[in-house]
Image (cartoon, rainbow, N blue to C red):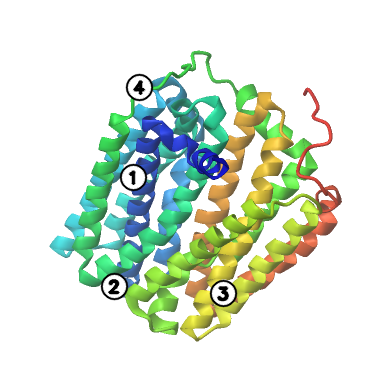
């Protein structure tokens, strides 16, 4: 009886058909995006041998989210989150189809591909806030925490399935990879449209600068939150190596496109294993110290990967990268939610999404441009060492964060 109850609780969100469709739509969409990323990165590198283009892949997908930040979140609140999600995945489908046509016709020029990825980035900019917000509307409040856990898992699972599938599919041919991604986006759109229309309070008040800047003001006032967010941003900005994995797979480790899929999936494997450990042994004390140590571990593992010429060691190092990063994400996200007053939580999360985009996509741009000058090995190894240095520096710059023991906020100001 107890065992059955625990099992039901574990899958509580899946008792709701709307959530099941939402869950699979997010998984399919994320997997398709990973397939496109792996295939485009590999083909651009093979055809141009220019690391700068690998960096631009991340940049052109980040800039739309940054430039449209005042529009994307408002669209999901005013037009309906399900509707915005479906429109965004439809646009992603057309982008994948456009890249497919470039590959089929032999017109796979960097300018056209990056143009298509820019539009793809616009679609992702609208998709992200809409999909993140919709989960609240598809499960009752009692099952919300359970749903969030499963939603978090979708990205990690997609980060394993997508790159591996992308490598295998591109091993057959580029058009097969892009065509499969386009079909997956179409399936995702269909799943989203079958979600029953959720109850959503539509935003009717006009957007103001005061409302938008409230999140920035709170973050810069609360040093624990600022320290946690900025620590992750600078560590990943300097230590990110994902953009250069095609170079490692092709020229350094000589493992081919299938090996590239394994390298892309390795951090997600480490992250999923760490999620299981954190569920069993949650962080209850010395949160600030653990955060700094895991960021330092992330940097050290990145440096090991950067210097490695053995495929097994490289995969193992990337697994450690994912595991250490998951601990820092776990601590940062809980601090962000529990230390933030409810009335500014949405705006603070919006600002956090910009920080995350800056660390990931701009990190890819930094890696690509730096590798074009100094080479991939120096770029990744030096970036890992820099991430370790950031952890040490943040211990000095944010002593309150480093001394934080509990994840719960001591007292929240009503302001």
Which marked residue is nearer to the observer: mark 3 or mark 2? 3
Q: Residues within 10 Å of mark 3 (few under 14, many from 20)?
A: many
Residue depicted at x 30% and y 44%: 92
- Rendering coords of residue 232 (x, y %): 65, 54
3D distance between C-alphas at marks 1 and 4: 27 Å
Dot 2: element: helix
In the visual, does 97 lie left or right of 329?
A: left
Dot 1: element: helix
- Using the image as rendered, state which of residue 240 and residue 109 is in the foreground: 240
The image quadrant where one finds the N terminus is top right
Query: Pointer 2 and pointer 4: residues touching (CB < 8 Å)?
Result: no
Of the residues under marks 2 and 4, which one precedes in the sequence? 2
Quarter-of-image position of residue 186: top left
Of the residues under marks 3 and 2, which one precedes in the sequence? 2
When the figure is inspected, residue 82 is found, relative to residue 4, above or below; the finding is above
Which marked residue is nearer to the observer: mark 3 or mark 1? 3
Q: Which mark is residue 38?
A: none
- Rendering coords of residue 401 (x, y %): 80, 49
Q: Which residue is mark 4?
A: 197
Q: Which residue is mark 2?
A: 47
- Rendering coords of residue 51 (x, y %): 43, 70
Q: Which residue is mark 1?
A: 119
Q: Which residue is mark 3?
A: 317
Which marked residue is nearer to the observer: mark 2 or mark 4? 4
């Amino acid at each position: 009886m107890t065992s059955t109850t625990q099992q039901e609780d574990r899958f509580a969100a899946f008792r709701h058909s709307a959530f099941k469709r939402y869950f699979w739509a997010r998984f399919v969409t994320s997997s398709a995006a990973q397939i496109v990323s792996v295939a485009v990165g590999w083909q651009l590198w093979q055809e141009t041998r220019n690391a700068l283009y690998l960096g631009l892949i991340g940049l052109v997908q980040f800039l739309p989210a940054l430039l449209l930040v005042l529009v994307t979140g408002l669209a999901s609140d005013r037009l309906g989150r399900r509707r915005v999600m479906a429109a965004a995945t439809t646009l992603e489908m057309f982008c994948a189809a456009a890249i497919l046509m470039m590959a089929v016709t032999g017109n796979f020029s960097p300018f056209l591909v990056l143009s298509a990825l820019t539009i793809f980035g616009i679609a992702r900019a609208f998709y992200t806030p809409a999909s993140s917000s919709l989960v609240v509307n598809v499960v009752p409040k009692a099952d919300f925490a359970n749903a969030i856990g499963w939603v978090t898992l979708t990205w990690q699972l997609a980060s394993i399935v997508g790159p591996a599938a992308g490598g295998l599919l591109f091993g057959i041919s580029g058009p097969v990879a892009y065509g499969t991604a386009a079909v997956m986006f179409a399936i995702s759109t269909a799943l989203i449209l079958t979600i029953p229309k959720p109850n959503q309070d539509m935003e009717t008040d006009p957007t103001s600068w005061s409302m938008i800047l409230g999140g920035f003001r709170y973050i810069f006032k609360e040093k624990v939150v600022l320290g946690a967010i900025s620590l992750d941003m600078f560590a990943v900005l300097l230590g990110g190596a994902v953009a250069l994995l095609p170079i490692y797979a092709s020229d350094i480790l000589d493992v081919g496109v299938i090996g590239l899929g394994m390298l892309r999936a390795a951090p997600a494997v480490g992250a999923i294993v760490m999620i299981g450990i954190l569920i069993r042994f949650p962080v209850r004390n010395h949160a600030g110290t653990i955060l700094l140590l895991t960021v330092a571990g992330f940097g050290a593992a990145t440096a090991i990967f950067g210097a490695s010429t053995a495929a097994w060691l490289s995969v193992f190092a990337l697994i450690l990268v994912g595991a250490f990063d998951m601990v820092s994400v776990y601590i940062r996200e809980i601090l962000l939610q529990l230390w933030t007053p409810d009335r500014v939580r949405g705006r603070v999360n919006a600002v956090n999404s910009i920080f995350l985009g800056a660390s990931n996509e701009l990190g890819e741009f930094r890696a690509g441009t730096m590798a074009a000058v100094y080479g991939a090995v120096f770029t990744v190894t030096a970036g890992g060492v820099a991430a370790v240095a950031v952890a040490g520096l943040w211990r000095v710059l944010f002593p309150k964060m480093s001394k934080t023991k509990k994840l719960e906020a001591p007292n929240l100001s009503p302001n």
